[in-house]
Image (cartoon, rainbow, N blue to C red):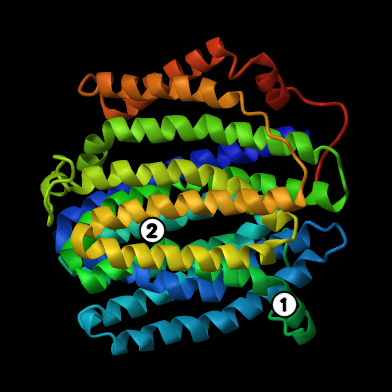
Amino acid sequence: MSLTRKVAFNTIIQIVGKVVTTGISLVLIAALTRYLGVAGFGQYTTAFAYVAFFAVFADFGFFWIFVREIANPKTDVSYAASNILTLRTFLGVIIYGLAFLVSFLIPQYADLRWGIGITALASLFLALNSTYVGVFQNKLKMERAALTDIIGRVIILILTLYFIKLNLGLNAVLWAYTLGNIVNLAASYYLGREFVHFKPSFDFEYWKKIFLQALPMGIVLILNMIYFKIDTLMLSLMKGPIDVGIYGPPYKVLEILLFVPSIFMGNVFPILTRYIHTKDSRVYPAFQKSFEFMVLLAFPVVLGVIFTASDIIRIVAGKEFTIAQTIAPIFNLPATSVLTLQILIIAVGISFFSHLFGYFVIALGKQSKMVLPNIILVIVNVGLNLLIIPKFSYIGAAITTVITEILVAFFSWWVVRQIFEIKLRLAIFWKAGLAGVVFGVSMYLLEGQFNFIVNTIIASIIYLSVLWFLGGINKQMFIDVLRPQKEKEGLE
């Protein structure tokens, strides 16, 4: 199978897997918002946002350093995976334990401390599982990662619905996440035996080497997490659970949609890294194709959500979240979860490009150059939130997120330009933009005609048809993906 087809297959598999897990996540959110209410869902959102701050210290960039490490054909995958998994277990127990203890020092979280502890435990198992995901990604066997993720999510869904039926409260729901993540890790271990013969490994020299390589990336990820999650925590401390609850569903939608660029770049990353290591000229067309793919995805996602935000919030969280608000209307628009989502989706669209440039910086091994830009981003983000949240609450947090994402894309592009000479062809922009407008309008006009999924399928067909007519996609693109090539371009 050609490299192009491998990437396409793995991307499609991940998209299918993500569609399934997204469906499960949406059912979970729908059940939880209706069971917990606005304030209760605000507590749920706060627990995950708080633990996410500590999660980045536990990850510290080890995942991407590991993926880059095993992209080298000379690397012993089992040796690398065993040492990194052992290291991450050791650090994870310390860091997530610290997360639980620190929560006792925050008065606003007095009723949430045990929930934070349970969430921290769930996050530990999820972090350990990502090492196996890195192996599957490197071997272009992402169908296994997708399968284990689905199994874990199904367990979480079944247990959550059961605990809700028994009316056991928020902490029981969080235990469902812990048990589901344990099953996910166990399934990954079983399916990964072919590639990794894991055993606890304590090569401290290797640990030191990996830690030093990960240090710049870890700093960047920590700074990234601060400006990505600080808004939710600042809302919880400055406003309270109701404001966080209104902000929660739109932000969950944002997190779900951010997996779209992550899925694609996750599959392209090992190939780009390999091309860079071997000084292969194919890195240039690969980067251009990746850019065009991101453009083709970004426009329908952004415009589709803007036109259907009310329906999405009603389906995801319930009618209560389409009317709940704690601040006055903004430009005569009700300051609800709907408006919040319409603002946040702009940040999602921009993130498609920050993902592309950001992953490329990592592939080049120049993540240290992102440290200063990320320090600037943290200062800007925290400063804007301090200024805007007191008056505009969750709407202010959403606006700050958009401004920050614009700066992320700019700085990532700027760093790439300093290192890598490449000129992007931009003709795809106007074609995808026009087709995207048609997609969004189609979604709006189809509202009430069929259900949301059918409307999305119809609008997607229209989008692809307009793109074909404009020359944004063509027959050769499909041939490149579907036709076997005589020369083998495999990763083995």
Q: Is residue 379 left or right of residue 31?
A: right
Q: Position of residue 483 (x, y in %)?
A: 74, 22
Residue located at (48% from left, 35% from top): 298
Q: Position of residue 243 (x, y in %)?
A: 19, 61
Vertical placement of residue 437 versus 363, above or below = above
Q: Is residue 165 left or right of residue 399?
A: left
Residue located at (85% from left, 39% from top): 281
Question: Judging from the image, what secondary structure is the residue with disc 1 in?
Answer: helix
Residue type, mark 2 in image: Ile
Q: Determine which residue is flagged by label 2.
A: 155
Residue located at (71% from left, 32% from top): 5
Quadrant position of residue 239: bottom left
Looking at the image, the residue that sits furthest to the top is 469
Q: Determine which residue is flagged by label 1.
A: 212
Report, in whole angstroms, how far the alpha carbon at label 1 lies from the one at label 2: 37 Å
Residue type, mark 1 in image: Leu
Residue located at (55% from left, 33% from top): 295
Cβ–Cβ under 8 Å for marks 1 and 2: no
